[in-house]
Image (cartoon, grey):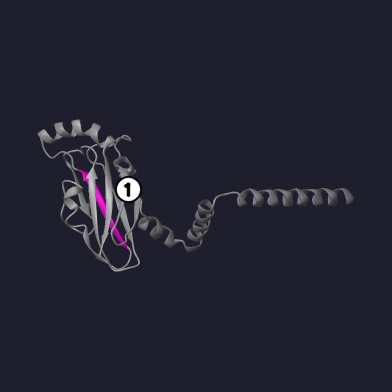
Amino acid sequence: MKKSKKIAIFIIIIFIILFILFCFCNKKQNIDSFQDDILFFKWLKLGENKEETIQTSKINPKIIFQVSYRNVNCKQMKFSDTINKNTLINEKIAPGTSGGFEILLETNQKINYQIKFRSKNEKPQNLNFQIEGEDRKYNSLEEMEQTLKGEIEENKIININWKWEYEIGKNENKQDTEDGKKLKQYQFEIYAIGNK
């Protein structure tokens, strides 16, 4: 009996040491990973809410601007960062791909804002843009500037989606082949301007 008690105590001590080591290692994980673990356990607990959370989560990059009086902010973007990876064809950017990005304007005062774009090189000809919640399609980012201005009193989110149309016609298909090389290099700047 004494020998089996010693073995049991030895096994319990090993489990305690392993548990302490596990806890110590977990402390070194970053906060985001820890929050993801908590969220995962909440999903397990809530069941149906897991699907809702996944469906409503955004995959588009977020560009944040602090908007204030007589202030101009500029951010540079690579178009390849805005691509919805689920639409890639054989992991390549091609006609039929789509994506988007989110502009967040942060302010704590009543202010006029204006969003401006500057393309640094050419985009594919059949690529068009759309502001979420509107029907109109735009041929360029710069074409949207007249719509992206107004007055805000609190934070405002603007979602911009894009799609590379395909199989429009024979001439366009030829153009798409040429434009496939352009999209990877397409870059642009976003300006957020604040005025009284």
**Picture coordinates of residue 48, whole percent (x, y):** 42, 62
In this orientation, which residue lies closer to the viewer: 120 or 164?
A: 120
Three-letter code, disc 1? Lys
Other residues around mark 1 within 10 Å, as few (<14) / some (14–19) / many (≥20): few
Does residue 84 appear in this view? no
Residue 38 lies left or right of residue 160; in this view the side is right
Residue 20 lies left or right of residue 9; in this view the side is left
Q: Which residue is mark 1?
A: 75
Q: Is residue 161 magenta?
A: yes
Tell me where the magenta segment starts and ends, as one range.
156-164
Q: Residue at x 37, y 56 (%)?
A: 57
**Picture coordinates of residue 164, whole percent (x, y):** 21, 42
Q: Residue at x 31, y 44 (%)?
A: 77
Q: Residue at x 11, y 37 (%)?
A: 169
In this orientation, which residue lies closer to the viewer: 109 or 106?
A: 109
Residue 37 lies left or right of residue 79; in this view the side is right
| Image vertical order of residue 42 relative to residue 179, above or below | below
Does residue 63 appear in this view? yes
**What residue occupies the far front of the structure in this picture?**
70
**Picture coordinates of residue 26, whole percent (x, y):** 61, 50
| Image vertical order of residue 72 relative to residue 126, above or below | below
**Picture coordinates of residue 116, whole percent (x, y):** 23, 51
Q: Is residue 125 magenta?
A: no
Q: Secondary structure at mark 1?
A: strand
In this orientation, which residue lies closer to the viewer: 125 or 172?
A: 125
Quadrant, the C terminus: bottom left
